[in-house]
Image: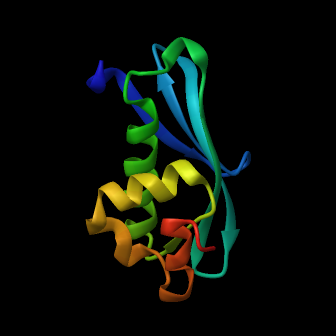
Amino acid sequence: MDDEIEVRDNPEASRYEAIVAGRLAGYAAYRSRLGALAFTHTDVLPRWEGRGIGSRLARAALDDARARGLGAIPHCPFVAAWIRRHPEYEDLVPEEKRGLLDGRG
C-alpha cells in the first residue's frame, strides 16, 4: 500500500493531498507564511484511516518544505505530534514556534 500513495502539493487549495488509486485519501492543509508553511489541519478520509496516510502526508509535506527552504509551523495537532515522534524534523520549526510541539502554542 505504501508505494501506492502519491502525495502532491495542491497550491490552489493550499494543501498537500494523498492520492490512492486516483482518489483523494487525505490532505494536510496549510497557509503560506513568509518563509514557512503553517499547517492548520490534517484529515484522512474514513475509508483510508489506519493505513499510514497521515504519516505519509506529514513526511512528504515537511520534506517538501525543507527542499524549498521553508520552515514549518505546526498549528495542526497531528503534524505537531508527528514532529515530536520524528525529532529530525524539529529544525524546520522556528525557535519561537517550538512551543506548538508540546501544546504551549
Q: Quadrant of the N terminus?
A: top left
Which residue is more in the foreground, 78 or 14? 78
Task: Residue at 39% x, 40% y: name it.
Answer: 55
Q: Nearer the viewer, residue 9 or 89?
A: 89
Residue 103, quarter of the rendered image: bottom right
Give x and y (percent) for residue 83.
Answer: 39, 60
Q: Is residue 65 above or below residue 95?
A: above
Q: How is colour applied across the structure in the image?
A: rainbow
Is 38 placed above or below 1 here? below
Q: Position of residue 54 (x, y in %)?
A: 46, 36
Residue 38: x %, y % from top left:
63, 65
Q: Is residue 97 above or below residue 27?
A: below
Q: Quadrant of residue 16?
A: top right
Q: Is residue 18 above or below residue 68?
A: above
- Give the left or right position of residue 13, taking residue 75 as reference: right
**Residue at (63%, 73%) from the top-left corner?**
105
Given the current orientation, which residue lies at the most extreme bottom position?
Answer: 96
The percent coordinates of residue 84 (x first, y second) are 37, 61
Left or right: residue 33 versus residue 51 is: right
Tell me: 73 left or right of 51: right
Circle count: 0
At a point 50% along the width and 32% down the height, the residue shown is: 18
